[in-house]
Image: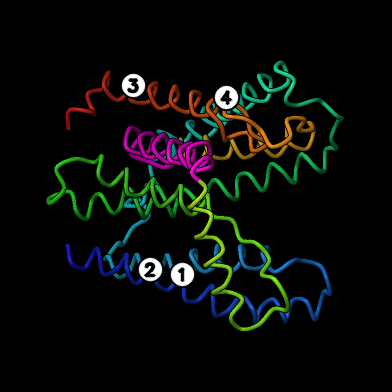
Amino acid sequence: MRRTFIGLFLFFGAIVLLSAVLTPWIYWGWDTLFPGADPFRRVFNRVLMITALVLLWPLARFWRIRSWKEVGIGDFREKGGDLWRWFGWGLLTVSGLFVLQIVCGERAWKGTWTALRLLEFFASAWGVGILEEILFRGLLFLALFQLIRERASAVLRVAVCTSLFFATTHYLKAVNPEGDITWLSGWISWGNMLMELGDVRMLALRWVSLLLVGLVLCALAYKRQTLWACMGLHAGWVFGLKVLNHATEWKGGSGNWWFQADILSGLSAEFMLGGVLAFVLWGMKRDGRLKE
């Protein structure tokens, strides 16, 4: 148990430290090669993501994880069909939210897209879906649950903790620090992001939605005991969001409690995600997994 929590502490601490320290230097180098190509916030987000991915391997070694199967990568011949089945469900559910916004006058159809653009969105969606699921549902849920299951009476604890972390990391968005970029700008970015937690309205509309996303994916990972379904659902959501955001225009201004410009925010999204969660949990109860 001690080794588990030491690993988590070192993992998260290293992500904060390295992203804050390295981002200014990487930004200066990148801006020298490609002046004005990317703002500081975008470089910060990329460094944050790459740092987390790089640190996965030492965390897995520290936890003595020796196989891909322990993080949900296995049984592809038996359960690989989940990839495309749940990709379809992800695309269908997020498309339903867009249609609802259009019908209610909050969003309007504005045009088409090219085949190259669709391919770009498709590749990006699968990249995000695969990498984030290995991190959040693979290492921080399935593998972590296996490590502490003798001490934890229910999988719910690990699922909630993982989903809280998932929701918070996706809720916080880097912003460009005021003034010139200095070696302290990475720490300033972390401070600015944490201040977003004071917006109660958006916590209710966006953070809760992201928490539900995390719980849906954790429930699906536990139900299937692999990440294929999670990767498919995650990729389907991301692909649908990218394509339909590109093809539609938000008309709702600052938004309201039901709808936001970010399609996965608002009460409408939370009702949809709650329905998906209920569907997955119903399947687990039918299969007897909720009794474990």
| Distance in Å between CA atoms under marks 3 and 2 | 34 Å
Please name whichever residue, 219 or 41, is drawn nearer the observer in this view of the structure: 41
Q: Identify the residue shown where x is 22% and y is 28%.
A: 290
Task: Tell whether label 2 touches label 4 (CB within 8 Å).
Answer: no
Residue 11 is labelled as: 2
- Residue type marked 2: Phe
Q: Are marks 3 and 2 in contact (CB under 8 Å)?
A: no
Whether 51 is drawn above or below 268: the answer is below
At label 1, the amino acid type is Ile
Tell me the residue at 58%/68% (across/down).
Answer: 189
> What amino acid is labelled 3 in the image?
Gly
Look at discs 4 and 3 and give the one toward the viewer: 4
270 falls in the magenta region: no
Q: Which residues are magenta?
A: 200-228
In the drawing, does residue 129 fall left or right of residue 58?
right
Of callouts 4 and 3, which one flags the residue occurring earlier in the amino acid sequence?
4
Q: Quadrant of residue 13?
A: bottom left
Q: Is residue 35 left or right of residue 181?
A: right
Display colour scheme? rainbow
**Disc number for residue 93:** 4
Relative image position of residue 42 (x, y in whole percent): 68, 63
In this rendering, would 272 be left or right of 218? right
Type of amino acid under label 4: Thr
Q: How far is disc 1 from disc 4 in space, using C-alphas?
A: 33 Å
Mark 2: secondary structure: helix
Quadrant including the C terminus: top left
> Label 4, label 2: how many angstroms apart (C-alpha)?
34 Å
Alpha carbon separation for disc pair 1 and 2? 6 Å
Disc assigned to residue 283: 3
Q: Which residue is mark 1?
A: 15
